[in-house]
């Protein structure tokens, strides 16, 4: 399929970004609980970051300031339409080891995926590869693309041994036009080796589109190593940001693509408000053409930036190490109750899916746990237990006390 012009080398600031991410080979120290930064009462065991990340106090304060600024709009200056968004590009780029020029601000993963799908092609009969039980925003768009391009959607079956990497590699071949994948499965944390999958995609000429909504910010990812075509990420889970703001990153060769809407601020010269009626065909540089209309959201953008600042201060590697230790402890305590999970070598450290004997979940389980202020979620056949740095040992004790009472 004629969709992959040869990949130019990374833009110069990509290497700089990698350095600034402070990537090291040593295992980073674990981070002590950060509960004080969150509005979570002691009696609540919130183990459901995969559902929605809670906002930290500085994030709420940034939102408050944004609301107050909008109440007095004479203080909002043209520069305010640009500065926050530019900072957001930079911060997210550091989190995924990419360059800020490739980052666009989008309201949802599905929006970013639509931008990717609009600009990818497949020959009739070409294949679009997704995983079984993948998140619907990263399935429906490819179903639609398959219909309109005359391509076929190939769904990788859930591997019995939890090895999604092998299963995905087996499915990607010369017929593959696009592999649309996550870094870890949203139902149970099953992890994919995206470096190997990226290599395979390049070998066969397939595009790699990644939805990092359930991983970016908590599971190390390096765009320089994986070399995807597009990355999308909703901001409200592991990025600990507000709802309705996320990111799309496009590789350099895709930055000349067609956006899915035509908003004024994506055009060259938009900084000069007095001359906006001098309509321009040229876009702002980089991937800014894919920005959603009204992306200068004076409330949400500062909130997301405050969250990303904190994530970068902790460091993604240290977050990953800390959460991996937490979920390993939960997995081994769950095993003693007869509950299974994917082997730790094949699971993302931050993300645990517990499986009950017989494959089903006890009736009323979630409601019984919620009645004790223990919050987890069920997706597919897994009970997701997804902690973050706000969790304490007591939260885990509460989970097991409630689980035992429910299962007895
Ligand atoms: C893997 C994954 N991608 C994306 C989303 C959110 O998609 P959207 O931003 O399109 O609502 C979720 C929400 O649970 C998810 O788990």
Image (tube, rainbow, N blue to C red):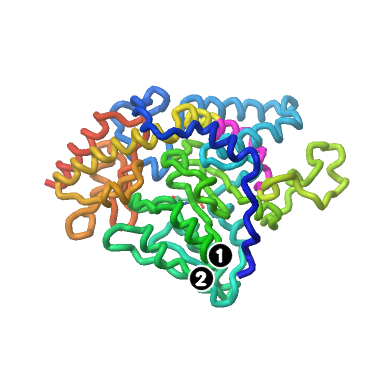
Could you say which quadrant of the image residue 376 lies in? Answer: top left
Residue 407 versus residue 115: which sits nearer the camera? 115
Q: Residues within 10 Å of mark 1 (few under 14, many from 20)?
A: many
- Residue 302 part of the magenta-drawn span: yes
Q: Residue at x 65, y 52 (%)?
A: 8
* Sequence-wise first label, 1 or 2: 2
Which element carries disc 1, helix, strand or loop? loop
Residue 117 versus residue 361: which sits nearer the camera? 117
**Left or right of 58: which side holds 42?**
left
The x and y percentages for residue 297 are 64, 37
**What quarter of the picture does the N terminus occupy?**
bottom right
Q: Residue at x 60, y 25 (%)?
A: 65
User: Which residue is identified by label 1?
Assistant: 205
Is the Cβ of the residue at disc 1 closer than 8 Å to that at disc 2? yes
Which element carries disc 2, helix, strand or loop? loop
Residue 71 versus residue 318: which sits nearer the camera? 318
Q: Residue at x 46, y 29 (%)?
A: 56
Q: Is residue 369 above or below residue 177?
A: above
Residue 223 appears in the picture as rendered: yes
Q: Which residues are magenta?
A: 291-305
Q: Residues within 10 Å of mark 2 (few under 14, many from 20)?
A: some
> Which secondary structure dominates the residues rendered in magenta?
loop
Residue 300 appears in the picture as rendered: no
- Residue 169 part of the magenta-drawn span: no
Task: Give the residue furthest to the left.
Answer: 408
Q: Residue at x 26, y 40 (%)?
A: 328
User: Which residue is identified by label 2?
Assistant: 174
**Left or right of 71: which side holds 173?**
left
Could you say which quadrant of the image residue 276 lies in? Answer: top right
Measure the C-alpha gap from mark 1 to mark 2.
7 Å
The x and y percentages for residue 158 are 33, 63
């Amino acid at each position: 399929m004629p969709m992959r012009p040869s990949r130019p080398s990374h833009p110069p600031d990509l290497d700089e970004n990698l350095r600034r991410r402070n990537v090291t080979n040593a295992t980073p120290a674990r981070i002590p609980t950060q509960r004080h930064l969150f509005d979570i009462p002691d009696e609540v065991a919130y183990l459901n970051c995969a559902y929605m990340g809670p906002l930290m106090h500085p994030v709420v304060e940034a939102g408050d300031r944004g609301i107050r600024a909008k109440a007095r709009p004479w203080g909002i200056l043209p520069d305010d339409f640009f500065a926050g968004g530019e900072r957001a590009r930079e911060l997210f780029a550091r989190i995924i080891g990419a360059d800020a020029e490739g980052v666009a601000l989008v309201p949802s993963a599905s929006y970013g995926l639509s931008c990717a799908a609009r600009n990818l092609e497949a020959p009739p009969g070409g294949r679009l590869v997704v995983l079984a039980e993948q998140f619907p925003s990263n399935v429906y768009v490819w179903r639609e693309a398959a219909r309109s391009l005359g391509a076929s959607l190939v769904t990788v079956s859930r591997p019995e041994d939890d090895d999604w990497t092998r299963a995905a590699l087996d499915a990607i071949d010369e017929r593959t036009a696009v592999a649309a994948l996550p870094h870890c499965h949203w139902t149970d944390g099953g992890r994919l080796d995206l470096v190997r999958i990226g290599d395979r995609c390049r070998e066969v000429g397939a595009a790699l589109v990644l939805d990092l909504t359930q991983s970016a910010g908590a599971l190390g990812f390096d765009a320089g190593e994986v070399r995807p075509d597009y990355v999308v990420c909703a901001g409200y889970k592991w990025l600990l940001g507000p709802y309705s703001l996320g990111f799309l990153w496009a590789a350099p060769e895709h930055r000349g693509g067609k956006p899915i809407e035509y908003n004024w601020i994506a055009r060259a010269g938009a900084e000069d408000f007095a001359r906006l009626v001098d309509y321009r065909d040229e876009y702002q540089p980089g991937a800014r053409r894919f920005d959603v209309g009204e992306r200068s959201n004076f409330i949400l953008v500062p909130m997301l930036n405050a969250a990303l600042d904190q994530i970068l201060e902790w460091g993604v590697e240290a977050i990953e190490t800390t959460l991996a230790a937490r979920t390993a402890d939960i997995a081994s305590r769950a095993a003693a109750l007869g509950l299974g999970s994917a082997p730790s070598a094949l699971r993302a450290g931050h993300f645990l899916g517990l499986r009950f004997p017989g494959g089903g979940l006890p009736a009323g389980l979630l409601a019984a746990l919620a009645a004790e202020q223990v919050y987890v979620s069920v997706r597919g056949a897994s009970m997701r237990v997804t902690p973050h740095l706000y969790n304490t040992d007591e939260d885990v004790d509460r989970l097991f006390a409630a689980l035992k009472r429910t299962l007895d």
